[in-house]
């Protein structure tokens, strides 16, 4: 496993813990289909089906030298389009998970590894 993929895996684990502490029920990680992958699939406290894209960076890279680059900056328009399409197809196949009143939404977790821990920013309904 490369350092980048190891950081990504640790970031996803930190993201799951963050969501669980907020009352989410995580029931899927790295859900792969031929058309895309979903980092985290969860139910929010109000029973909304939530698809979560996780972007993780090391503190030494985030904001490095005038770039001001943050993990969420890696969520490009093309990645957002693919994320939306993958989530929509998943929700279409899994009607049993979609609450008819709450529906489903897309969230992004921007995670920065700092001093041995993780700082998480949660963007809901992107």
Image (cartoon, rainbow, N blue to C red):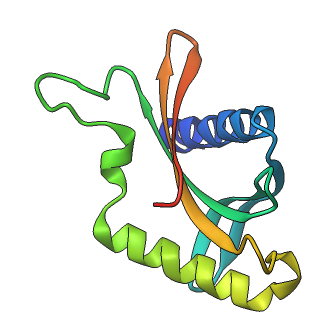
Q: Is residue 17 left or right of residue 25?
A: left
Where's residue 51, x and y in %? 64, 63
Residue at 71%, 82% (x, y): give it: 91
Considering every residue shown, the one lying at the far right of the view is 96
Question: To which quarter of the image does residue 8 belong?
Answer: top right
- Find residue 34 and report its image quarter: bottom right
Work out which quarter of the rendered image holds the C terminus and state it.
bottom left
Looking at the image, the residue that sits furthest to the top is 115
Residue drawn at the location 55% of the way across and 56% of the way down: 107
Query: In the picture provided, is 24 more to the left or to the right than 104?
Result: right
Q: Residue at x 51, y 9 (%)?
A: 115
Q: What's the residue at 50%, 23% (across, down)?
A: 113
Left or right of 114 in this view: 86: right
Q: Which of 123 and 30 lies nearest the eye of the viewer?
A: 123
- Picture coordinates of residue 92, whole percent (x, y): 71, 90
Examine the rendered structure and indicate whether residue 22 appears above or below residue 39. above
- Above or below residue 117? Residue 55 is below
> Can you name the residue that lies furthest to the left here?
66
Q: Position of residue 63 (x, y in %)?
A: 24, 26
- Using the rendered view, name the quadrant where residue 116 is placed: top right
Image quadrant holding the N terminus, namely top right
> Measured from the top left, where is residue 45 in percent x and y?
80, 50
């Amino acid at each position: 496993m490369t350092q980048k993929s190891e950081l990504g895996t640790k970031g996803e684990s930190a993201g799951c813990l963050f969501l669980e502490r907020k009352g989410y029920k995580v029931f899927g990680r790295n859900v792969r289909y031929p058309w895309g992958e979903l980092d985290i699939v969860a139910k929010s406290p109000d029973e909304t089906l939530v698809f979560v894209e996780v972007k993780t960076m090391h503190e030494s890279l985030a904001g490095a030298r005038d770039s001001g680059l943050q993990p969420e900056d890696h969520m490009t328009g093309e990645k957002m389009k693919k994320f939306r399409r993958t989530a929509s197809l998943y929700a279409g196949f899994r009607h049993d998970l979609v609450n008819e009143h709450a529906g489903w939404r897309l969230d992004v977790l921007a995670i920065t590894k700092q001093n041995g821990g993780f700082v998480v920013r949660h963007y809901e309904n992107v």
